[in-house]
Structures are given as structure tokens and as C-alpha cells.
Amino acid sequence: MWVYEKKLEYPVRITKPDVQMAKYLITQYGGPDGELSASLRYLNQRYSMPTNRAKGILTDIGTEELAHMEIVATMVYQLIKDAPIEVLKEAGLGGHYAQHDRALFWVDANGVPWSAKYIAALGDPVADLHEDMAAEQKARATYENLINLTDDPGVIDALRFLREREVVHFQRFGETLVHVQEYMNSKKVF
């Protein structure tokens, strides 16, 4: 299926701790428009795609989203790893610390735990691909908002990379939608 190399798809170079930014960024780990939701959505939807090409695109993008989740997790961890408990409390992460210490957990920026309701899978390839394109645009917009919340060049660099990958995924899903529609509209002779 794929080969795992023990390095991130894109390097993370955090220049300073920033607990507040970690709190914002965690939404791309476990929020409704985050990388966990995207990866599970695509890897689940691939089974109802009508062509191997469409299945392959969803598999490829779904596994890449797992790599993006790893990038986000690395960023969050680096932003909070040495933060004193008082700083965590001041940033509104006292509850997180009480339950998880500095371990990552799938939550959004408000601390709401991840839920399977974030994943859409209708079994209709056209509807699912439209959902996927919308999901990529929501993730892109969230990354743009996160870029506006930090001045750390290392955080900005990684967020820009992730944002651009969302744009590429949107384009690939658009191409796949056209392919699937052509397949579904073609005459089938047996």
C-alpha cells in the first residue's frame, strides 16, 4: 500500500513555545474540519467509488491526510511540551492537562472531543466527492485563519504547506468528480 518513512512529510521548525497557538491549532487535529476527519472520510468513502482510479485518489489523499495529522500533532506538541502548568491554565488548557497532561487528544480549539458525526459518507460517489471538495475548502480556510493567529515563522511555514496541500486535494477531487460523472453517464454495453 505505502511505505512509512520515519520523517514528516514536511519539516516542523517551531521557533518558540506558544500554548495559545497550540490551543487554536489542535482543531486541525481533532476538529470537524481537521485532518482526522478528512482521512477517515476519504478512506471510508473509497469503497463506494465506481472506478479504481477514484478509489485510488481517495486512498492516496486519505493516507496523506494521516501524514498531515502527524505534522499538526508535532506542531502542537512542540508548542506546549515545556510549558509550565500555570501557562497551560492561563491559556484555558487546565482541563486538558487534568485529563491528558501534555498528551494530544482529538479535540477542537474549544476542547470539544472528535465525533464520528464529522464524517459524511452517503455511498453516492457524486455527493461524496462534492462533500470532499467542500471539506478541503473548509480546511484551507481554517489554515488561513490559523496563519493569521501566529507570528512564528516556523508555524506559518508548516501551515502554508498544509494549506497548499488542501488546494491540491480540492483540485484532485474536482478531476475525480469529472471522471466519475463521465463513467456514470457512459453507455455500458454487456
Image (spheres, helix red, strand yellow):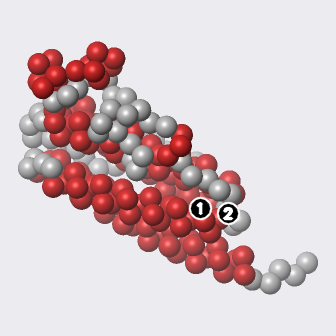
Residue picked out by circle 1: 128
- Name the spot of residue 29 as percent of width and height, x first: 36, 40
What amino acid is labelled 1 in the image?
Asp
Left/right of residue 83 with respect to residue 133 in the rendered view: left
Classify residue 90 as left or right of residue 1: left
Residue at figure coordinates x 53%, y 67% from the top left:
130
**SS class, disc 1:** helix
Residue 83 percent across, percent down from the top left:
13, 24
Please tell me which residue is depicted at 44% across the width and 58% down the height of the picture.
Answer: 135
Q: Kindly identify the amino acid type of the residue bearing the numbered disc 2.
A: Asp
* Percent coordinates x, y for residue 143 in the rendering: 27, 55
Residue in the picture at 61% in, 76% down: 179
- Examine the image and state in which quarter residue 100 appears: top left
Cα distance between the residues tagged 1 and 2: 6 Å
Q: Using the image, determine if residue 134 lies above or below residue 40.
A: below
Say whether marks 1 and 2 touch (CB < 8 Å): yes
Counting labels gives 2
With respect to residue 114, does 184 lie above or below?
Answer: below
Answer with the quarter of the image where residue 78 lies. top left
Residue at label 2? 124
Q: Residue furthest top?
A: 98
Q: Secondary structure at mark 2?
A: loop
